[in-house]
Amino acid sequence: MACVFCTIFCVQINFENPMEVSFYHVAEGNLIPSIIRLLEKAYLSGQRCIFFSPVEERVKLVDKILWTFSTNAFIPHGDKSLGFCEQQPIYFTSQFENPNDAKTLVLVDTLDHKKPGNFEKIVLIFEEKQQAENANLIYDDLKKNGENVNYWKQTPNGWEKQQ
């Protein structure tokens, strides 16, 4: 195992079970709509997902918006208060847990856990300059170690993959 540490994120990589790590650098002021679009993308992939933020207010806000974001679409999701945790396609939490045996972990804000679990994909979403600087350091370290990493930056024309 190799660890990549920084003040914003901590990602532990298990080289026997490599994962994909995707970084999404959101344009200023566009965080919540971007989270909704990326959660929709995760849902449509057919894999179970965890949405994690250590900020309970953020979890509640994204949960509330996801219930009402579109009159034409619905993304099933839930949290501990709704029950049926193991059946939720997208599980919302501010406590690090994986009751739905998700393979995708979507992170917003910070991650202070050294062991993110046995995920196939980790998605890091951030917008602030300091977070972007720290995410770039993690990205560079992971890439140097040969990990499967992607870095996407939001532009007025959509998401552009960075090299």
Image (cartoon, grey):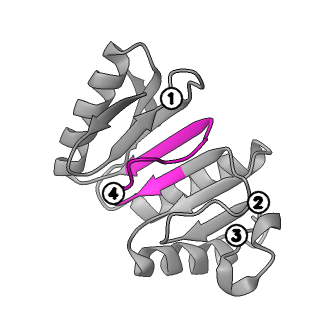
Residue 100 seen in the figure: yes
Q: Residue furthest bottom?
A: 81
> Mark 3 vs mark 2: which is more N-terminal?
3
Name the residue that disc number 1 marks: 14
Q: Return the residue nearer the eye: 4 or 55.
A: 4
Please provide percent x and percent y for residue 45.
75, 42
Which segment is the magenta one? 106-125
Name the residue that disc number 2 marks: 89
Name the residue that disc number 3 marks: 70
Q: Are marks 4 and 1 in contact (CB under 8 Å)?
A: no
Q: Disc 2 vs disc 4: which is toward the camera? A: 4
Name the residue that disc number 4 marks: 112
Q: Residues within 10 Å of mark 3 (few under 14, many from 20)?
A: few
Amino acid type of the residue that numbered disc 4 sits on in the rendered structure: Asp
Please provide percent x and percent y for residue 132.
24, 43
The C terminus sits in image quarter = top left
| Residue positioned 54% across, 29% down in the render | 20
Label 3 sits on a secondary structure element that is: loop
Label 2 sits on a secondary structure element that is: loop
| Residue positioned 48% across, 72% down in the render | 94
| Residue positioned 62% across, 55% down in the render | 39
| C-alpha distance separating marks 3 and 1 | 38 Å
| C-alpha distance separating marks 3 and 4 | 33 Å
| Residue positioned 63% across, 45% down in the render | 104
| C-alpha distance separating marks 4 and 1 | 17 Å
Label 4 sits on a secondary structure element that is: loop
Figure check: 59 above or below 143: below
> Mark 3 vs mark 4: which is more N-terminal?
3
